[in-house]
Amino acid sequence: MARLVYSAITSLDGFVADAEGRWDWSVPDEEVHRFVNEREGRVGTYLLGRRMYEVLVAWESPELVAGQPDWMREYADVWRDADKVVYSRTLAEVSSARTRIEREFDPDAVRSLKASADCDVSVGGPGLAEAAIRAGLVDEVSLLVSPVVVGGGTPVWPAEGRWDLSLEDVRRFGNGVVHLLYRVA
């Protein structure tokens, strides 16, 4: 059975975007990006909320990576090679290959996907991740913690509820980012 991994880049105070919706403070440098490429290369399917999809779909564009370093082009390949499920009630169509829209989050459908998948499944976007957490579907949490305090914004965690985790790995990067890998206890 595949694992469902909640992956996020967060500020030290637990936000994926600041109060103005900016996340420029979280853009990975080469070392972090190469690490992300390696981890994300294990993902066969991305489960994404609409906002997260709208950010990541840029990787579909050859113009984005033209002339960029190999580590950026590698991530674009990882993105294009994975299946994507976008959960949205408002998105009319998708602009990336291997992508479908689901209007509602169905925990049973995700359980079936996990049971039949050969590769890990990743859930991205805190709103969708909250639904997966509340349904008991998340097996692992992969956080890249940026060395910045933004003071408010979009939280990385659900506002309520207890969730016991077991720390599996820690990695420190030269730019001060720390990767924390947890398994759901």
Image: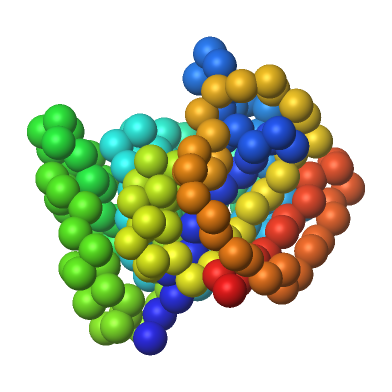
**At x 61% / y 59%, what residue is drawn?**
142
Horizontal and vertical percent position of residue 14: 64, 37
Horizontal and vertical percent position of residue 141: 57, 61
**At x 20% / y 69%, what residue is drawn?**
108
Residue 89 appears left or right of 8:
left
Which quarter shows the C terminus?
bottom right
Residues 48 and 164: in front is 164
User: Is residue 111 placed above or below 155 in the rendered structure?
Assistant: below
Which quarter shows the N terminus?
bottom left
The answer to whether one can see residue 81 in this image is: no
User: Is residue 49 placed above or below 42 in the rendered structure?
Assistant: above
User: Is residue 147 placed above or below 76 in the rendered structure?
Assistant: above
Residue 162 location, quadrant: bottom right
Residue 44 appears left or right of 183:
left
User: Is residue 110 placed above or below 175 in the rendered structure?
Assistant: below
Residue 27 location, quadrant: top right
Furthest residue in direction front, as rendered: 161
Q: How many marks?
A: 0
The answer to whether one can see residue 102 in this image is: yes
Furthest residue in direction top, as rendered: 20
**At x 44% / y 65%, what residue is drawn?**
138
Horizontal and vertical percent position of residue 173: 84, 52
Residue 116 location, quadrant: bottom left
**At x 67% / y 64%, what residue is drawn?**
181
Residues 170 and 29: in front is 170
